[in-house]
Image (tube, grey):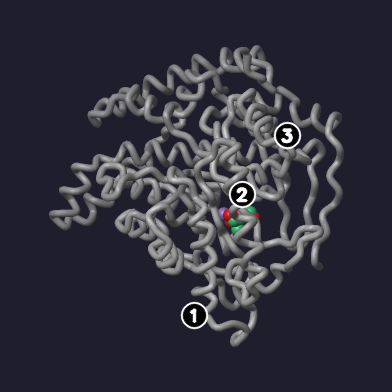
Amino acid sequence: MQTTPISTDLIAESNARNMAALEDDYAALGRKLERRGIAIEAVTDKAKGWEVAVPSWGAGRGGTRFAKFPLAGEPTNIHEKLEDCAVIQQLGRTTPGVSPHFPWDCVEDYGALREEAASYGLHFDAVNSNTFQDQPGQAQTYATGSLSSTLEATRQQAVEHNIDCIEIGKQLGSSLLTVWVGDGTNFPGQQDLGRSFDRYVEAAAQVYAALPDDWQMMLEHKMFEPAFYSSVISDWGSSLMAAQELGDKCKCLVDLGHHAPNVNIEQIVARLHRAGKLGGFHFNDSKYGDDDLDSGSINPHQLFLVFNELAEAEADPRHGFDPAYMIDQSHNVTDPIESMLSSAEAIAGCHVRAQLVDRDALRAAQQDNDVMLAFRTLRAAYETDVGPILAMARLEQGGAIDWLSTYRASKYRERKAQERKAVGLGAGIV
Ligand code: PSV
Ligand code: MN
């Protein structure tokens, strides 16, 4: 018997109210797609198979360097985060995986935590290590680096933490470790740029050596922050070099917010796929840097273009193709449940649109150098409103056609505000 935090009767009543309009829209879209030779049911089936993991840390209110504005009823521990992730999955039906972060999500009994997740119909996805922040009682500080530290004892501590994460992950049923380090410098001359990379690779190799055969390790690059002059794994080039040196079980993770403005991220995706090193994604959106805004809220077209490359890669899987999809956002002013439902829908929408691209026509236009036809072929897919397909996929899997109004009608957050302990005001740096 599965635990359902939102009343299934409430979802059924809400769906009954929205059913006629959905059927009308779905039929109209079906006729439109049929004229393009596409069977809507096949696309809906593809949408039903689509999954993207949610980050445990995204269930709480994030914050900026200046402040955090807590939300009444937000989760304060992994158990409450799982309950919120269950709401997202119950209404949206694309997010059964939860990506945990350690030590933020540490508990005594991981076997019990895995069962708790399963009771909600959830499972654990990639485990994330944290060597970008000191913990109480920790012997060595990460203030000047972790895996790339000049200090052997600090590197060793970071290696051991990552190995602990693998051990926890095994108990949680995960098979993926994501490694992001904040290592880098704030001053020219602070560190030798070449040697710090060497130290990183050497330490990461010790983590790699601890990976079970069926596990993968993903290296996540980020251009800047917390280090502002140089980051050790700053870009996809550094990430690829390190992944290639480490071995076949190591791949690169692309977080959409971790690039310089205007970088052609979809091309990076294509390059990493070609190198057999496309490990996974952290989806979010950004205007200026690592803003961690909701996926597709600023540049939905770029998200679509990333998915177009993924559809290309799927059609031509050069070295196998099985990236791990995750959301990585910070929700500063919205209810995180609403933001993640909205993002998961935006991401699934881009996945579906990319399936609608007439790939034969696109390739023919590319081959003929028919620039406008190639562009319009992509555009036709991008401009298709796939909302009815996503809603039908949700409905057929027990989710909500209109997840926002259903969620608000459930008064879930108000109920949690009564039950959960309040989160304190976050300190800013102003
Ligand atoms: C770093 O900015 C990052 O994108 C990494 O994925 C971290 O694990 C996550 O955010 C949470 O801080
Ligand atoms: Mn990330």
Which residue type does callout 3 highlight?
His
Question: Which label's residue is closer to the chain start, 1 or 3?
Answer: 3
Question: Which label's residue is closer to the chain start, 1 or 2?
Answer: 2
Q: Which label is found at residue 79? A: 3
Q: Is 321 displayed left or right of 390 in the figure?
A: left
Which residue type does callout 1 highlight?
Gly
Query: Tag 2: Cα neighbours inside 10 Å, few (<14), some, or many (≥20)?
Result: many
Residue at the disc numbered 1: 194
User: Ligand 1 within 8 A of label 3's CB?
Assistant: no
User: Ligand 1 within 8 A of label 2's CB?
Assistant: no
Could you say where residue 61 lies in the image, as x and y percent from the top left? 73, 46
**Residue sitting at x 76%, y 40%:** 77
Which residue type does callout 2 highlight?
Cys
Q: Is 144 displayed left or right of 257 in the figure?
A: right
Quadrant where the C terminus sits is bottom right
Q: Which label is found at residue 229? A: none
**Residue sitting at x 42%, y 29%:** 49
Could you say where residue 350 lies in the image, as x and y percent from the top left? 42, 41
Q: Is 350 displayed left or right of 364 in the figure?
A: right
Identify the element where label 1 is drawn: helix
Q: Quadrant of residue 40?
A: top left
**Residue sitting at x 63%, y 41%:** 339
Camera sees residue 263: no
Between the C-alphas of marks 1 and 2, the distance is 28 Å
